[in-house]
Image (spheres, rainbow, N blue to C red):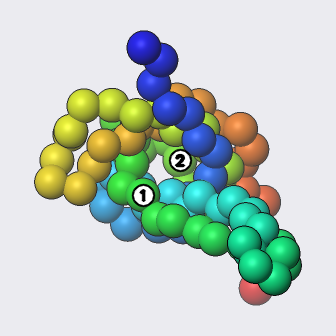
Amino acid sequence: MSRKRLQGRIISDKMTKSRVVQIERTVRHPKYEKVMRKSKRLMVHDEFNRTKTGDVVEIEESRPLSARKRWRIIHVVARAAAKAAS
């Protein structure tokens, strides 16, 4: 049995070895047929603290790693753009 894989953007990197990833998907409304965006926030394990806020990552299901973490980062798809110095 293969594990689920999703792609999302990191929205928080304030924890050690943990990240919050937002997954967005589009869904068509059953009655009105308008295309809507739905999002979900997942706690993800990042063993070596390699990712930063804004990075696009691929994540995979895993065994429970803590009370809320059930996903881990597989690889970074795209790095976030560097912030300009003020």
Question: Residue 8 appears at what percent x and percent y?
Answer: 62, 52
Question: Residue 41 appears at what percent x and percent y?
Answer: 47, 65
Asked whether residue 53 is in view, the answer is no
Q: How many numbered discs, if any?
A: 2
**The one of 59 and 83 positioned closer to us in this rendering:** 59
Q: Is residue 31 left or right of residue 56?
A: right
- Residue at image coords 50%, 32%: 4
The image's mark for residue 54 is none
Give the residue furthest to the left.
Answer: 67
Three-letter code for the amino acid on which mark 2 is drawn: Thr
Picture layout, residue 74 above or below residue 68: above
Three-letter code for the amino acid on which mark 1 is drawn: Leu
Q: Dot 2: what SS?
A: loop
- Res 14 quadrant in image: bottom left
- Residue at image coords 36%, 55%: 43
Label 2, label 1: how far apart the Cα atoms are: 15 Å
- Res 9 quadrant in image: bottom right
- Residue at image coords 28%, 49%: 69
Pointer 1 local density, CA inside 10 Å: few below 14, some 14–19, many at least 20 = some
Q: Quadrant of the C terminus?
A: bottom right
**The one of 50 and 75 positioned closer to us in this rendering:** 75
Of the numbered discs 2 and 1, the one sitting upstream in the chain is: 1
Labels 2, 1: front one:
1
Q: Is residue 8 left or right of residue 81?
A: left
Question: Residue 36 appears at what percent x and percent y?
Answer: 76, 75
Q: Are marks 2 and 1 in contact (CB under 8 Å)?
A: no
Which residue, given by chain and number where applicable, does mark 2 sit on?
A: 51
Which residue, given by chain and number where applicable, does mark 1 sit on?
A: 42
Picture layout, residue 29 above or below residue 53: below
Give the residue furthest to the top.
Answer: 1
